[in-house]
Image: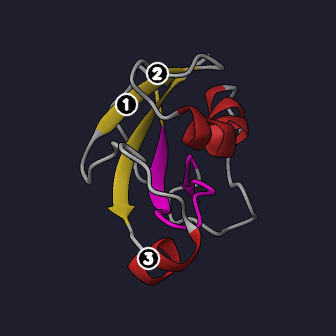
Amino acid sequence: MKKVRITVKRVARYDDLIEEYENPMEHPCGMTEGQEFIADGWNKPEGFCDSAWDSISAFVLTLSHGGEDIYDGWMKNKRSAMISCNDGFRPVSFLLETLDDSADRSE
């Protein structure tokens, strides 16, 4: 099984939706752009958001088992995926990249 690097690429925030619909929350999201995690198959990396993991774990599992070309040509690197969490107020975009023993490649 291959490891998968998860990189936080973008953290958005929709203040208008938060103001109108969300109950106040003390710590709604702790992700920061550039933050990296390494997933080992189905195991959620330590410190990773539970809700975000629910959104991306199936893709991580696919890549860790050698899956490629998710969504048929969507990504330039067929061993990667760009997936967002399902938080409608603060969506976070994650780049998932399969790692292996050889040098990181961008096919």
- Closer to the camera: disc 2 or disc 3? 3
User: Marks 3 and 1: in contact by CB < 8 Å?
Assistant: no
Residue lying at 59% horizontally and 16% vertically, measured from the top left? 43
**What residue lies at 70% left-to-right and 26% top-to-bottom?**
65
Residue 67, percent from left and from top: 71, 38
Residue under numbered circle 1: 37
| Mark 2 residue type | Pro
Whole-percent x, y for residue 89 in the image: 51, 67
- Would you say the residues marked 2 and 3 are in contact, meaning their CB atoms lie under 8 Å apart? no
- CA gap, disc 2 to disc 3? 27 Å
Where residue 45 is drawn, which disc sits there? 2
Instruction: Report which residue position mark 3 lands on.
Output: 14
Q: Assign a secondary structure to mark 1.
A: strand
Query: What residue is drawn where x is 75% and y is 65%?
Result: 72
The residue lying toward the viewer, choosing from 71 and 51, is 51
Element under label 2? loop
Cα–Cα gap, marks 2 and 1: 6 Å
Q: Are marks 2 and 1 in contact (CB under 8 Å)?
A: yes
Disc 3 marks which amino acid? Tyr
Task: Identify the magenta region.
Answer: 79-97
